[in-house]
Image (cartoon, helix red, strand yellow):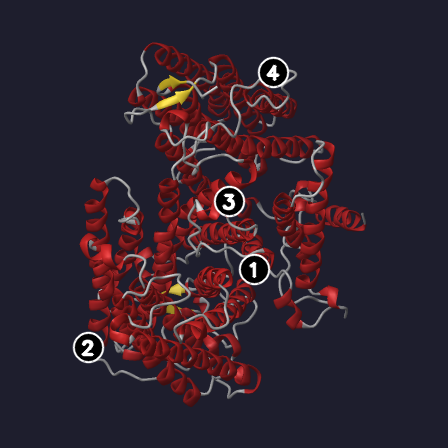
Amino acid sequence: MSAIAIGHAEEQDHGHAHEIDLATYQENTRRNRLGMWLFFASEAFLFLALLATRFYLWRGPHGEIVRPDLGQTAGLVVTVILLLSSYFMNRAEVSIANNKRTDFLISLLITAVLGTAFLVGVVVWEWGMFPSLVEGHIKPTDGVFGAVVFGMTGMHALHVLSGVVLILNVWWLGRKGHFSSERHWGVEACAIYWHYVDLVWIFFYPALYLIGETIGAGH
Amino acid sequence: MSLFSLGIARGLVGQTLGMLVGMLLTVVTRVLLGWEAWAAEPAWTVGAVCSIIGFLLGVGALDDWLQWTKGIDTPLHHGPPADKPAWTRYFSVDYNHKVIGVQYTVWGILLLMVGGTVAMIFRTELAQAGLQFLGLGLYNSFIGMHGMIMIFAILLGVGGMANYLVPLLIGAEDMAFPRLNALGFWFNVPGSLLLLLSLFIGGWDAGWTAYPPLSARGPIGYQLFFLGVFAIGLSSIVGSLNLLVTLLCMRPQGMSLFRMPIFCWAVFATSLIQLTATQLIGVSFLMVSVQRAIGMGFFDPRGILGEISPLVGGGDPVLFQHLFWFYSHPAVYIFVLPGLGIISELLPVFSRKPLFGYKWIALSSMAIAIVGFLVWGHHMFVSGYNDILRVPFMYSTLLVAIPTGVKFFSWLGTMWGGKIHFDTPMLFVLGAISVFLIGGLSGPILATVPTDFPLHDSYFVVGHFHATMFGGFVFPFFAALYFWFPKVTGRMYNETLGKIHFFIMTPAFWVQTLGQMGVGVMGMRRRIADYDPSLGNYQIESWHLAVTIAGFAIAFGVLLMLWNFFQNAEVGVAAGDNPWRSRSPEWQIPSPVPEHSFAAPLRVVGEPYDYGLADSGYVSTATPGDD
Amino acid sequence: MSEHSTTKRRSGIYREGVLVAIGLTILTAVEFYIALNLSSFAIMMILALLKAILVVNYFMHIRSLWSEDEH
C-alpha cells in the first residue's frame, strides 16, 4: 500500500502525462512499435509451428488432409464474434485519436465483452468444459485430433485472455483520464495486439474447421 | 544493510514461496475436483511455473510494469542505488546495460563451471572401461545436464557480450528497452535453478534433446527441465528483440548499417534467429509437457484406441524432431555467430590492418542465419522420415560452408602482411580459428548422408560439436573477456598467466576434440556410460583416458583465467583508456566506462577498420564545438 | 494540413473501419460457403491471406512502422 501511495505522490509532483516532451514521446513510440512488431514476428513462429503440427498430424490413410467433425455452428459464431470485436477495437483506437473519450471507452468495453464471449464460446461450447451445459465434440485425450484442437485453441485462448485483461486495464486507465489524442501508445499497443490475436484466428479457423475431409474422431 | 536489500536474495525467497504456493494450488484444485490430493508431477510443474513468477516478483524485475498497469509513471533510475553500497547493484535489478552485461557474463561463467564440473565427473567415469562410480540413470542425467547447462551458459555469454558491447559500439546511451533488458537477464536465474533442481527429483535421462517417447515417459525432472528451458527461451526472445530495436533505431548520425562495428552485424543476425526460432523449442517441449500432464497425444503413436493407426489419431515422434531441430539447429548459429563476430572484430586491432572484405563478412553472417533455417533435417537422416527429404537437407547443409568459408578467407586476408601483436586476446582469436577449422572440416562428413549413417549418434558427432562450440564460442568468448577486461574494470590482467592459460588450453582442446572423434570412429556411441575395451584394437581405453586428461587441463586453464581476473579486477595495473589502440567507440572513453558512457553524442567521421591509415578516425566523441 | 481536411480524413478513418469489417465478414461468409461445397487447401489459404492483409494493413496499420504520416 505504501508503495502505491508514494507512487501517487510522485505522479502529482510530475504530472503523469507530460513528463517528457512530445518529440521524445513520439520517438519512444516508434521504438515501442517496432518492438511490438518484432514480438509479433516471434509469436508468428509459435503459431506457424502449431499450424505445421496440424497439417503434419491430421492425415488420412493415403496422406490426404483430414479434420475431425467439430460442428460448424460453434466455430462460425466465435469467429464472427472475434471479427466484430476487432472492429470495435479499431473504433476505440480511432476515437481516442480524435479525442472522443466516451466513444473510446464504450468501444473498448464492447471489445472486452466480445472477447470474453469468444472465450466462453470456446471453453464452454467447443471444449465442453461444463458437460452439464454443452457436450463438447472432442476431448484432449482423443489422439492427435484432441491434442491439436486443444493445443491450437488453447494457445489462442491464452492470448485472447491476456488481450481481454489488457483491454480492461486500458479501459480502467482511460476512465481515470489517461491517454490523449497525441499520447496513446498504450491504446495502440493493446489494439494491435488484439488485432494480432484476431489475425491468428483468421488462419486457425479454416485450419481447424474448414480444410480437409471430415473424419470421425473415433467415438 | 540486510541480506534482503539484495534483489537476488528476495528473488530466491520469492521463488521458494512461489513453488510452495503453486504446489498448494494444485493440491487444493485436486481436492475440489474430488481427486487424490497429492500427485507429484502436477504439483512440481505448477509449482515450478509459479516459482519463476515468484522469483521475478521477488527480485523486482516486474515492479515498473505493475506500476504502469495502475497508470503510475516510473522514471528510469540511473546510477548506483542511493542508500546501498555500489556493488549491490550487480545483485539486484539494475537498468544500466553495462551492469546487465556483467550480470549475464558472470552468471554465464558460473554455469560454465557447473556444466564443466558435471562433465569432469562423467569424463572420469569414462576414463576406464567398466562402470566405476556412476549409475546408469545418473550418468544419463549428467550428460543431458552437461549439454543443457552449457547451452544456457553459452546463451548467457552471448547475452553478456551483446548487452555490454552493442550500445557502446554504436554510441548509444543504453539499450532501447532497459526494463525489458533487466527482465531478460533475471529470467535466467530461476530458469537455471529449476534445471539444477530437476536433478534432485529424478533427473531426465534422454540427453539434452529430450526426444519422445523417452521424455514422455521418464521421471518428473523433465517438467522442470522444460520450464527451465522456457525461462531461458523467454530471456532469449526479449533480449534479441531489444537488441534488434537498439541496432535499428539508436545508431548515431552517419553510422549506416555498413559502417557499424562488425560485431553488431553478428549480433543482428543472431538476434533474428533468436527472436523467431526460439519459439519452436518452446512449443516442442510444451507439447511433450502436456502429453505427460494431460495425455494430449502429439507424439504418442497409440492413438485413441491404443492402436497404431493413422485412422484413430496416432501421433508421431518424428514431428518432435522436426520442431525441435527447427530451433536447435539455428541455435548452433546463435552460439557461434557472435563468437565469429568477435574474431572479426579483434583481428584488425591486433593485425593493425583494415578488416578484409567488411561487407562480405557482414552479409555472410546474415547468409548463415538465413541458410541456418533450412538445414534442420540433417539431424534426422536416420530418423525414418521421408527419404526424399535427405538430399535437399544435405545440400542446404553443405551450403553453409560457403559463407563460413568467406569468413575464414577474410580472416586470413586481414592477417596477411599485418603487424601482428600476439597478446592474449589475439592468441585466443588464433586458437579459435584453428579450433573452428577442425569443427568446420568435420562438418561435411556428418552433413553427407552416406557418411552420416555410420557416424550418427557416435562420439564423432560429440567431437565435431565440441570443436564448433569451442571455436565458435568458448575461445572467442575468452578472447573477448581478456580484450574488454581493461574496459570493464579499468585494470590490466596478468599477461603471463593469460598466455599460460592459452598454451595449456589450446593443445588440450585439440587432444580432446580429435580424441572424441577418434573414439567415435572406433565405435563409441554417444550417451552410453560404458564401452567395450576391445574396440579400436584395444586402444579405445587409452584414447578415452587422453580425452579425460585433456578435459581436466582445460578446466585448469579456465580456473587460471578466473583467478587472473579475480586477482586483478580491483588492484591490477591501471590499463589506461585504450591499451589496444583500438578505433572502436568504447575505447575512446574512460575505463571503466562512466555511468552514461558517452558525454556527447557520437559522430561518425570515417570507416571503422582503417587501421594503419594515417590521420583517419572512426568516431569523434567530442562535441562539435570543440574542434 | 488545414483543419477542414483533417476532420475529413478523420471521418474517413471511421468509415474505413466499417468497410474493412464488412469486407472481412464477406470473406468469412465466402470461406464458409466454399468449405461446405468444395474443400480446397489453396482457396482457403488465399482467402485467409486476403483477410490477413486487410487486418494487417488497415486495423494494425503496419505502414506506421516506416511512414511518419500514418497514425
Q: Residues within 10 Å of mark 2 (few under 14, many from 20)?
A: few
Q: Is residue B494 left or right of residue B192?
A: left
Tag of residue A32: 3
Q: Secondary structure at mark 2?
A: loop
**Residue situated in front as seen by the camera: A164 or B585:** A164
**Residue situated in front as seen by the camera: A162 or B519:** B519
Asked whether residue A108 is in view, the answer is: yes
Q: Residue B128: x and y, percent?
A: 40, 76
Q: Are marks 4 and 1 on the same chain?
A: no
Mark 4 touching mark 2, by CB under 8 A?
no
Mark 4 touching mark 3, by CB under 8 A?
no
Q: CA distance from mark 4 to mark 2?
A: 76 Å
Q: Are marks 4 and 3 on the same chain?
A: yes
Residue B351: which quarter of the image?
A: bottom left
The answer to whether residue B615 is above or below residue B285 is below
Q: CA distance from mark 1 to mark 3?
A: 40 Å
Q: Secondary structure at mark 1?
A: helix
Tag of residue B416: 2
| Residue on which the image places disc 4 | A134
> Disc 2 is attached to a residue of which chain?
B
Type of amino acid at the residue the image marks with label 3: Asn
Q: CA distance from mark 4 to mark 1?
A: 44 Å
Q: Residue A121: x and y, percent?
A: 58, 20
Q: Is residue B304 left or right of residue B33?
A: left
Q: Residues within 10 Å of mark 3 (few under 14, many from 20)?
A: some
Q: Is residue B403 left or right of residue B268?
A: left
Q: Are marks 4 and 2 on the same chain?
A: no
Tag of residue B199: 1
Type of amino acid at the residue the image marks with label 2: Trp
